[in-house]
Amino acid sequence: MMAQATPDIAAIEAGLARGFVRRARWRLSEIVFWIAALLVILAWPSRSLLFNEIAILALFALSLDLILGYAGIVSLGHAAFFGTGAYVAGLLTKEGLTDPTLGLAIAAASAGALGFATSFLVLRGADLTRLMVTLGVALVLFEIANQWSALTGGADGLQGVAPGPVLGFFAFDIFGRTASLYSFATLFLMFVLARRIAASPFGLSLCAIRDNPLRAAAIGIPVSRRLIAIYTVAAAFAGVAGALLAQTTQFVSLDVFDFARSADVLLVLIIGGTGYLYGGIFGAVAFKVMQDIFSAITPQHWQFWIGFVLVALVLARRERLARLARKALSRAATRLGTAIRVAEAGLPSQGADT
Amino acid sequence: MSAALETVGLVKRFGGILATDHVSFALEEGARHALIGPNGAGKTTFVNLLTGVLSPSEGRVILGGEDVSRLRPDQRVRRGLARTFQINQLFPEMTPLEALALAVSEREGGGKDWWRRVGAGSVVEPVARIASRFRLTDVLDRPTGSLAYGKQRLLEIALAFACKPRVLLLDEPAAGVPQAERAELIEAVAALPREVAVLLIEHDMDLVFAYADRISVLVDGALLTQGSPEAIATDERVRAVYLGESEHG
Amino acid sequence: MLTILFDGVAYGMLLFVLACGLAVTLGLMNFVNLAHGAFAMAGGYVTVIVMERLDVPFLATLPLAFLAAALLGLVLERLLYRHVYGRSPLDQVLFSIGLVFMAVSATDYFMGSEQRIIKLPAFLKSRVEWAGVSIGIYRSLIIVICGVLVLALQAVLTRTRFGARLRAAVDDARVARGLGIDVDTIFAVTFAVGSGLAGLGGALGTEILGLDPNFPLKFMIYFLIVVTVGGTSSLTGPFLASLVLGIADVAGKYYVPAFGAFVIYSVMILVLIVRPQGLFARPR
C-alpha cells in the first residue's frame, strides 16, 4: 500500500510547497499600491504635511493591528507606547543624539520595554480587566509626563526638538518633504517586517491563539509567551510611530498620551479592517482625508461625527460589513491567511486515494 | 514495560463534589485502551486532568516516566501527549492546511520562528502525509468552518496526531458524526500507528469492543474495574451500572 | 486629618452613587458602558440650567436631575443599547466611546466649554466645628443623601420582589428568562435608575467634581476603577471600593500633591495584579 501511496504524497507535497510560497509572496496589487503611494507623495509636495500625518497614523494603526487583529487583545491605551516613543525621541535630540535613525531605534526599544513590562498585567484577567489595565497605563504615563515638567515641558510640551539629517544626508526642511518621505520609508520598512512576522509560523500561531486559545495550547503553543512577545513588538512599532511624530513635527505635547489618541487609532483600524495588515493603512488614509475635508467645513464638530461613525458602525454590524467589503476586494486586498490554490497542483481526487 | 502514561491516586474536587476519586491508572505503550462509563462518570474531567487543563487536588500524572502534574497543557503536548475534544475545537478562520502546518511547526520547534514563512523547511512532507492519512487532501484549502462535520472531526484528530504524540487521548471521536461519515472516521482511528498509545473515551460500544485491547470502567469518578473486552462484557457490575442507567432513563 | 477623612468619605460616597449604575449594568448585562459619565454630566447640566434660567433652589433641582438622567437613560437603552448587549467587548467599547464623543461634542456645542459653577445656597456653604473637626455642611449633606440612597438600594435589592428578580437576572440571565422573569424590563428599569443616580450624583457633586463638557472622559477611569476593584457581584464591593478610593484620592492630593493622581492609579494596578477579578468580588 505504501509504494502506491508515495507518488500521491509527492504530488501533494509539491502542491503544498507551491501553495505556501504563493501565500507569502507579495501580490501584484500590493506592489502597485506601494509604488502608487510613493508617486503620490512625490507628485504632490504641497500636501507633504498631510502625507506625513497619514504615514505616522498608519504605522500606529499597524502596530495596533498586531495585537488586536492578530492576537485579539483590545487595548484602550495604545497611546502609552506612542507617547513613550515620542518623548524618548524628542529628548534624545535635546541630549545631542540627533541622528534620526538612532532615535527611532532607541524609541522602539524603550516603548518595547514598556510593552514587555506591562504585558504581564494585560494578560491577567478577562476583558474588562484588560481594558482597565491598558487605559490605566496610558493615564499613568500622562500624569508622569504632566508632572515631570522639568523633563517633558509639562503642559507646554517639549520644545526645540531638532533632529539631524536622515542618514546624514537628507536634512529636514520646512516644507516637510524630507519628513513625508522619511515617514513613508519608515512605514514601508516596518510594514515589510510586520508582513514577514505575519507570514511566519509565529504569526500563524497568533491567529490560532486568537481563534481558539484552548486548542492552541492543546497543539503545543505556549500562549502567554507568544502574546507577551507580540505585545512587546506592537509596543515597539507604536514607539517608532511616536518617534516619527516627534522628529518630523519637532515638538512633543502631552496629547501623545491622550485617551482620544488611543480611541482614534482604534477607530482607524476598525474602519480599515483588522487582521490583514493593510487595514491600518487604508483606515489612516480614510481618516486623515476625511479630517482634512471636515476641518475646512466644520472643525468643531469633528469629534461628534467620529462618535457618530463609531455608533453607526457597531449598530450596522461592522463584521458583516467588513466581510462583504473584503469579499468584494478579495482579489485586490492581501489576506495573509486564506486560500491556497492547491487544486492547481493537480492533486488526485478523493476517490483515487487509497 | 513502563507505562506511557499513568496516574497515581488522582483526585479532583470541585467545592464539595468529588469529580475524580483516587484514580490510579496506567496506559501501556502502544496500547489500544478504552475508557467507558455512564454519563457524568467524570471521563472528560479525567482527560482534562491528564492534559493539564485542570490541576489535581491530589495525586500525580506521569508521562513517559516524568511527573508532569505541574506542567501546563502546551508543555505536556511538547512531551508527547495530545488530545482531541468531545466538541470540535478547531480554528474556524484558518484552513486545515494552515492548522496542520502550524501543529507540525510547533512540534518541530519552529513555532517561535518569525522570520521564515510558513511552509519553509520540513513542514510540507509531514503535512502531506497527515492529510493523506486522514482523508483531508481535498479539503485542505477551505476554511475550517465550511467543512462537513465528519471532515471537521477528522481534522480534530489529525491536529492532535500532527503533534507527533506518544500518547493520544481521543474524547468521543465519533460523537455527532452522521452515519454516512462514520466509516471514514473509524477507519482513520483504526489505522493509527502502533507506536502511539491510544486512550479512547467512547459511548459507542460497538466501536469500543471492536477497537480496544483493554477497557477501563469509570463510575462516579472512580475506577470500577479494568480488563480485557471479554472480561468487561461479562462483568456483572458493569452490566448493572449500565442497566441501572438505562432504567433511570 | 479627620477633616481629610471626612472629605474622603464624602467623595467616596459620591463616587459610589455615580458608579453604582455602572456596576449593576456591567454585572447585569455584561456591558462595559464607558458612556456612563455622560448621564452624570446630563444631571449636572440640568441642575445648572434649571437654577440659572428658572431660579429653582439647588436642593429642588436634585430630583429633577435624577429624573432627567433616568429618562435619558431609558430612552437610549430602548433605542440603542439593547441592540448591543450580546456583542463582543470590542463592539461594546467602540459603541460606548462613540456615544461619549457625541455627548461631549454636543454638550460643548450647546453649553459652551467653560467650567460651570453652581451657586450653592448660603446654608450649605457654612462649616461646623464638632469635636475639633471642621465639617462642611455641604459634604455632610452629600454623605446623608448618599447614605440614604445606599440603604434604599440595598433594601430594594434584598427586600423587594424586583430586587430578587434583579439578582436572579444578574446571576444568570438565561435561567432567569427561563423562569419567566421579564429580563428586558429589568434591564430597562435598572439602566434608567442607574443613569438617574449618576445624574443625581453629577448634580450633587458639581461643587466638588466640577462640571464641563469633558466630565465623562475625565471621570471615566474613576468609575471603572470602582467597578473593577469592587467587583460586580454585590453592592457592598463597589461601595467599599468607592470609599477606599475617595479617601485615598483626597488624602493623596493633600499630603503628596505632586503624586495625587498616581495614588488612585497605583491602587488600581496593584489590585489588578493581585486579584484580577476585583478586591471584593466572589471568585467565579
Image (tube, helix red, strand yellow):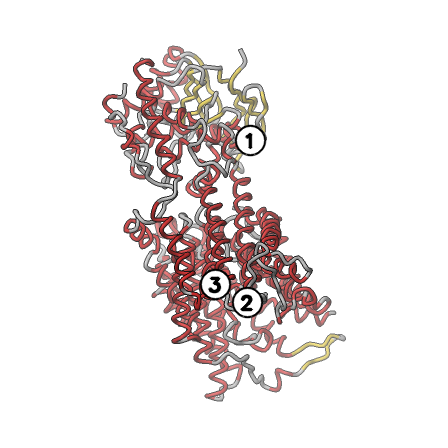
Q: Residue at x 47, y 63 (%)?
A: A53
Q: Nearer the viewer, mark 3 or mark 2?
A: 3
- The correct choice, above or below, for C240 with respect to B181 in the image is below
| Protein chain holding label 3 | A
Task: Say left or right for C225 vs C163.
Answer: right
Secondary structure of the residue carrying tag 3 is helix
- Crowding at dot 1, Cα within 10 Å, few <14 / some 14-19 / many 20+, comes out as many
Kindly identify which residue carries mark 1: B56
Q: How many residues crowd around disc 3 within 10 Å: few (fewer than 14), some, or many (20 or more)?
A: many
Residue closest to the far front: A169
Tag 3 residue: A53
How far apart are the two marked residues, 1 and 2, measured between alpha carbons?
A: 44 Å
The amino acid sitting under disc 1 is Pro
Q: Nearer the viewer, residue A284 or C184?
A: A284
Subunit bearing disc 1? B
Q: Position of residue A165 (x, y in %)?
A: 58, 59
Q: CA distance from mark 3 to mark 2?
A: 30 Å
Q: Nearer the viewer, residue B106 or C231?
A: B106
Q: Which residue is mark 2?
A: C219
Q: CA distance from mark 3 to mark 1?
A: 55 Å
**Within the image, what quadrant is residue A335 found in?**
top left
Q: Position of residue A9 (x, y in %)?
A: 34, 22
Q: Secondary structure at mark 1?
A: loop
Q: Nearer the viewer, mark 1 or mark 2?
A: 2
Q: Are marks 1 and 2 on the same chain?
A: no
Q: Is residue B175 visible?
A: yes
Q: Amino acid at mark 3?
A: Glu
The residue carrying pointer 2 sits among few (fewer than 14), some (14 to 19) or many (20 or more) residues within 10 Å by Cα, namely: some
Task: Name the residue located 74 percent from the left edge and 69 percent from the top edge.
Answer: C1
